[in-house]
Image: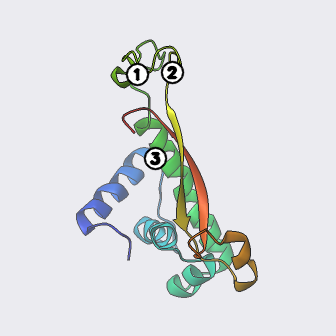
């Protein structure tokens, strides 16, 4: 359901609690809060589904989701960093004569991917991909090692 093995879930939970401020409350543990977050993002489930599954109000689901999201953003800042923040070194893939001078100062790539989404029936036409399924186009920026 959460798209990860239990030991990985436990490590992520412990990391978020110890280093990024995820806390339990009287009415909901930090484990259940993380589970709610992963339930929504791991499988294309709506907040309404999470409300029914976890027996919480829409307001609580939204608040708890946003709290874990804040922790994940803090975690991402610590994990996702360029190897060379000054971008002084040209990547070896661009050092060949066939790429010079067109990609001389290039520091990364931009690519898009379609992520499956669940939307209300009245909004399906807006999210239809060329393959006929509902998806959201996501643009990604990365270095040449992805």
Give the camera-side residue of 19 and 126.
126
Task: Bin the neighbour count of mark 3 within 10 Å (Cα to Cα): few under 14, some 14-19, many 20 and up.
Answer: some
- Residue bearing mark 2: 103
On the image, the x and y values in percent for residue 27 come to 53, 75
Q: Is residue 131 above or below residue 23?
A: below
Give the camera-side residue of 23 and 104.
104
Residue ID at (47%, 58%):
23
- Give the quarter of the image for residue 119: bottom right
Q: Is residue 100 above or below residue 125?
A: above
Cβ–Cβ below 8 Å for labels 1 and 2?
A: yes
- Which of the labelled discs sits on residue 94, or is there none? 1
Residue ID at (53%, 64%):
115
On the image, the x and y values in percent for residue 125 come to 72, 76
> Would residue 1 appear left or right of 60 to someone viewing this image?
left
Cβ–Cβ below 8 Å for labels 2 and 3?
A: no
- Residue bearing mark 3: 20
Q: Nearer the viewer, mark 2 or mark 3?
A: 2
- Earlier in the chain: of badge 3 and badge 1, it is 3
- Which of the labelled discs sits on residue 45, or is there none? none
Q: Secondary structure at mark 1?
A: helix
The span from disc 1 to disc 2 (Cα, nearest Å) is 7 Å
């Amino acid at each position: 359901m959460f798209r990860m093995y239990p030991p990985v879930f436990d490590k992520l939970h412990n990391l978020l609690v110890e280093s990024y401020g995820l806390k339990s409350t009287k009415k909901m543990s930090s484990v259940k809060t993380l589970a709610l977050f992963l339930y929504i993002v791991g499988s294309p489930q709506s907040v309404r589904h999470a409300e029914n599954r976890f027996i919480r109000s829409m307001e609580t689901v939204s608040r708890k989701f946003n709290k874990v999201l804040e922790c994940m953003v803090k975690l991402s800042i610590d994990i996702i960093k360029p190897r060379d923040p000054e971008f002084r070194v040209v990547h070896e893939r661009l050092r060949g004569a066939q790429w010079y001078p067109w990609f001389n100062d290039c520091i990364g790539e931009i690519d898009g991917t379609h992520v499956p989404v669940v939307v209300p029936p009245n909004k399906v036409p807006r999210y239809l991909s060329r393959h006929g399924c509902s998806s959201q186009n996501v643009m990604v920026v990365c270095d040449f090692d992805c």
